[in-house]
Amino acid sequence: MRTTDLNELMQTVETLRGELHPDLDARFLEQVIRAEAENPEDDAEAIRVIELALKALLNLSVVR
């Protein structure tokens, strides 16, 4: 994915997140998008990265 396309996608997701689900963690969504963009042919690796991001988010939520 081209950098400009990735940036546009992230901006669109952030706009929608802010309007529809402001309680959703923006950094987590960015990590999900990056995991998919960086591993377009490797679903297992994308899922592994997303799971790590989710675990970090859940650990952060527990600490708060």
Image (tube, rainbow, N blue to C red):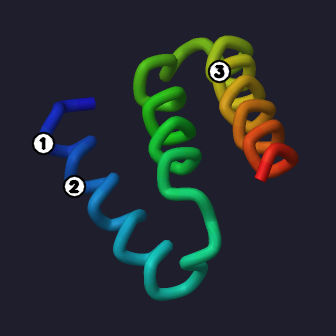
Query: In terms of sequence position, does the residue under pointer 3 or pointer 2 come before the other?
Result: 2
Residue on which disc 2 sits: 8
Residue on which disc 3 sits: 49
Which residue corresponds to the image point at 80% horizontal and 32% vertical from the top-left? Answer: 55
Query: In terms of sequence position, does the residue under pointer 1 or pointer 3 come before the other?
Result: 1
Q: Which mark is residue 13?
A: none
Label 1: which secondary element = helix
Which residue corresponds to the image point at 50% horizontal and 17% vertical from the top-left? Answer: 39
Verify CB contact (< 8 Å) between mark 1 and mark 3.
Answer: no
Q: Amino acid at mark 2?
A: Glu
Residue farthest right in this picture: 62
Q: Amino acid at mark 3?
A: Val
Q: How busy is the neighbourhood of tag 3: few (under 14 within 10 Å), some, or many (20 plus)? A: some
Label 2: which secondary element = helix
Left or right, 23 with reference to 31: right
Residue farthest front in this picture: 64
Query: Measured from the top left, where is residue 41 in percent x and y?
Result: 54, 15
- Tell me the CA gap for discs 1 and 2: 6 Å
Q: Is residue 37 above or below residue 30?
A: above
Q: Nearer the viewer, residue 18 or 5?
A: 18
Residue farthest bottom in this picture: 19
Label 3: which secondary element = helix
Viewer-nearest of labels 1 and 3? 3
Query: Measured from the top left, where is residue 50 in percent x and y?
Result: 67, 30
Verify CB contact (< 8 Å) between mark 3 and mark 2.
Answer: no
Q: Is residue 42 above or below residue 54?
A: above
Left or right, 13 with reference to 5: right
Please identify the quarter of the rendering in which residue 59 is found.
top right
Query: Measured from the top left, where is residue 27 in percent x and y?
Result: 49, 47
Q: Which mark is residue 4?
A: 1
Q: Amino acid at mark 1?
A: Thr
Q: How busy is the neighbourhood of tag 2: few (under 14 within 10 Å), some, or many (20 plus)? A: few
